[in-house]
Every structure is written in structure tokens, then in C-alpha cells.
């Protein structure tokens, strides 16, 4: 906790505000975390790992993507999962790419 909050940049060690430890181990003010969630930001601002259980959101995204046609059936891309760190080769999609390892959509193309 001898560093600044990644949202408001206040020094956490001397802060009087409550501090939360994210699942990834990074620390943040509770009020800053609440504000992030209110703005639909569910990834750690430092390492991009999910800050809460996103499995229900991934299930909804699975259902939505199943109804869409993909005109890029033959294009493959490499992705890095921000949650588990796995590198996968997946079928390109305009909306999102799913990690083969942990089933998260918190990924980025590499």
C-alpha cells in the first residue's frame, strides 16, 4: 500500500479512505472501485484483470454472439487473456474474442 491509488492518485498509505484489495492483489480506494463499477469498468486499471466475477456477463455475451453471423469465418487471430494470461488462436470476431483456457472475454489481440 505504499503507492498511489490508480484512479485518484492519492497516496494509499496515508489515506483516511477505506482501501480495497482487488483479486489481482492491487490496491485501490473503495470509493474509486465503486465509481469504476458505476461506469462499467470491471478491469484493474494496472493489470487489466477482472475485478469481480464476470461469468454471468460472459454467459450473456456467449448467447448474444451465438445469434450473430460472423463474416470472418476463415480469419484467425492470436489473443492474450487478461485474466489467466493464456495465449490462444481463435476465430476473429468484430465484437469479442473468448479465451479457450478460462472462457473469459477479457482478452486483447496480439
Image (spheres, rainbow, N blue to C red):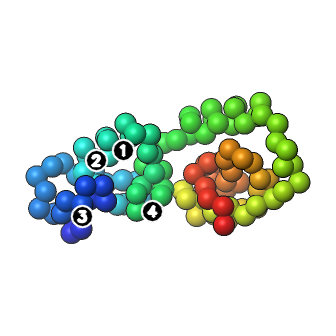
Q: Position of residue 50 (x, y in %)?
A: 48, 50
Q: Is residue 62 left or right of residue 5?
A: right
- The residue where tag 4 is placed is 47
Residues tagged 1 and 2 counted as in contact (Cβ below 8 A) = yes
Per the image, label 4 sits on a secondary structure element best described as loop
Q: Residues within 10 Å of mark 3 (few under 14, many from 20)?
A: some
Label 1 and label 4: CA atoms lie apart by 15 Å
Q: State the separation of the CA atoms marked 1 and 2.
A: 6 Å
Mark 2, secondary structure of its residue: helix
Q: Are marks 2 and 3 in contact (CB under 8 Å)?
A: no
Q: Which label number is shown at residue 4?
A: 3
Mark 2 and mark 3: span between their CA atoms? Answer: 12 Å
Q: Which mark is residue 3?
A: none
Confirm or deny contact between disc 1 and disc 3 (CB under 8 A): no
Q: Is residue 82 left or right of residue 44?
A: right
User: Which residue, given by chain and number where applicable, does mark 2 sit on?
Assistant: 32
Residue hosting label 1: 36
Residue at image coords 34%, 60%: 26
Q: In which quarter of the view is residue 41 placed?
A: top left
Q: Which residue is located at x 24 percent, y 51 percent? A: 29
Q: Position of residue 54 (x, y in %)?
A: 52, 41
- Residue sitting at x 76%, y 61%: 77
Sequence-wise, the earlier of marks 1 and 4 is 1
> Residue 25's image quarter?
bottom left
Question: Residue 4 vs residue 59: left or right?
Answer: left
Marks 3 and 4, how far apart in space?
15 Å
- At mark 1, the secondary structure is helix
Amino acid at each position: 500500500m505504499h503507492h498511489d491509488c490508480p484512479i485518484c492518485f492519492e497516496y494509499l498509505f496515508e489515506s483516511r479512505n477505506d482501501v480495497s484489495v482487488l483479486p489481482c492483489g492491487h490496491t485501490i480506494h473503495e470509493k474509486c472501485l465503486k465509481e469504476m463499477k458505476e461506469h462499467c469498468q470491471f478491469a484493474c486499471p494496472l493489470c487489466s484483470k477482472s475485478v469481480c466475477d464476470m461469468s454471468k456477463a460472459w454467459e450473456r455475451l456467449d448467447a448474444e454472439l451465438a445469434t450473430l453471423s460472423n463474416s470472418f469465418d476463415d480469419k484467425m487471430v492470436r489473443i492474450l487473456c487478461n485474466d489467466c494470461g493464456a495465449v490462444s488462436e481463435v476465430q476473429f470476431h468484430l465484437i469479442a474474442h473468448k479465451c479457450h483456457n478460462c472462457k473469459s472475454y477479457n482478452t486483447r489481440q496480439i
